[in-house]
Amino acid sequence: MSNSTQLPKDLGFTRDLYIMPFDHRGSFQEKLFGIKGRTPTAEETREIASYKQMIYEGFKVALEAGVPREKAGILADEQFGSEVLLDCKANGYMTACPAEKSGQDEFDFEYGTEFGAHIKKFNPTFVKVLVRYNPQGDHTGNQRQAERLKKLSDFCHSNQIKYMFELLVPATAEQLKSVDGSTARFDHELRPQLMVESMKQLQNSGVEADVWKLEGIEKVEDWKKVVEQARTGGRSHVGIILLGRGENAEKVRHWLSTAAQVPGVIGFAVGRTIFWEPLKSVKDGTRTREQAIQQIAHNYKSFCDLWTAARK
């Protein structure tokens, strides 16, 4: 079990964090470009990369419009976002890179045993993992994931890279049945406590996140319980950010307004809610690239402004 005497040095991140995540790979290929079950061609890869470049351009426009650069960062993938990551780093913006294989129910490394070399290539501020973990789910699978995730945790902390842990808690059949099959009721009644249990199990397995990236929670008191678990046992500087989960803007605004009231929740990572509709309209020919960039910048800045206002 991890305790305060075994914690990595300088664990945590306390500065406000406004992340623009566009590290989507499988879902991006399939839902925007119709590429499923195969590797994109070189030409398709270039086209997808050009769409991700639009998101990055929108990010930069938002910074010019007043989003504080010391709080802003991007989350992009090596496959389609290498140029973005390198340019972002060169400009001194915070960066995050994913380590997980896209579209897997169980966490595994995108680049297998070579994961460390790929991380060092970009030297990001954060390494991010997306993990589906239910503490009452597949015990053996959870153990396998925890072992791999500890290996990454140890790598990050020994290389002075922050560890960003995106935790998704998918409902088991039994849990859904207990709330009459309602995913909304599961999210509201069961998921917050399951998140706390998941974090505890992972911490006890030696997985030490600097920042937890979590699904939206409806109630301030549930956010406080999650923060308490994130910061237990001497982890007093560990931060939490809220993810958008592709929800509509109204839902995300509600989550942000709630989360911003809780000390320890330091920001957000909202992606598809910001960029999906503008990119789709370019693909459909109803917007120009420049119009999409401006819309992405507007959408991103509006969430940053909302967070700032809700903090006061």
Image (cartoon, helix red, strand yellow):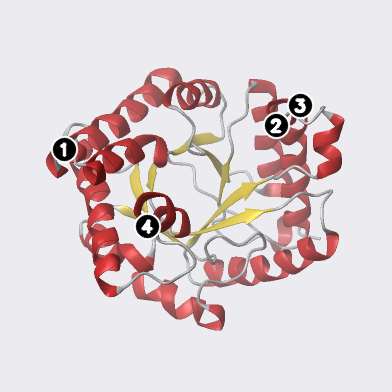
| Residue behind mark 1 | 64
Residue 300: image quadrant is top left
Disc ID at residue 189: 3
**Foreground: disc 3 or disc 2:** 2
Which numbered mark, 1 or 2, is in the foreground of this view? Answer: 2
- The reply to whether the C-beta atoms of the residues labelled 3 and 2 are less than 8 Å apart is no
Q: CA distance from mark 1 to mark 2?
A: 40 Å
Residue under label 2: 183
Residue at 56% over, 82% down: 113
Considering the numbered disc 1 on the image, is that residue within a helix, a strand or a loop? helix
Instruction: Estimate how packed mark 1 is, as few (under 14), some (14 to 19) or many (20 or more) residues with alpha carbons within 10 Å.
Output: few
Q: Is residue 15 left or right of residue 152?
A: left
Q: Residue 65's x, y, as percent? A: 17, 32
Q: Amino acid at mark 1?
A: Glu
Q: Nearer the viewer, mark 2 or mark 4?
A: 2
Q: CA distance from mark 1 to mark 3?
A: 41 Å
Q: CA distance from mark 2 to mark 4?
A: 29 Å
Dot 3, crowdedness within 10 Å: few (<14), some or many (≥20)? some
Whichever of labels 3 and 4 marks the residue nearer the N terminus, that label is 4
Residue that appears at 78% across and 53% down: 201
Query: Is disc 4 placed on a helix, strand or loop?
Result: loop
What amino acid does circle 2 point to?
A: Thr
Q: Nearer the viewer, mark 1 or mark 4?
A: 4
Could you tell me which secondary element the residue under label 3 belongs to? Answer: helix
**Picture quadrant of residue 184:** top right
User: Quick one: label 1 or label 2, which is nearer the N terminus?
Assistant: 1
Work out whether mark 3 precedes mark 2 in sequence or the reverse, and give the earlier one. Answer: 2
Q: Earlier in the sequence, mark 1 or mark 4?
A: 1
- Mark 4 lies on residue: 76
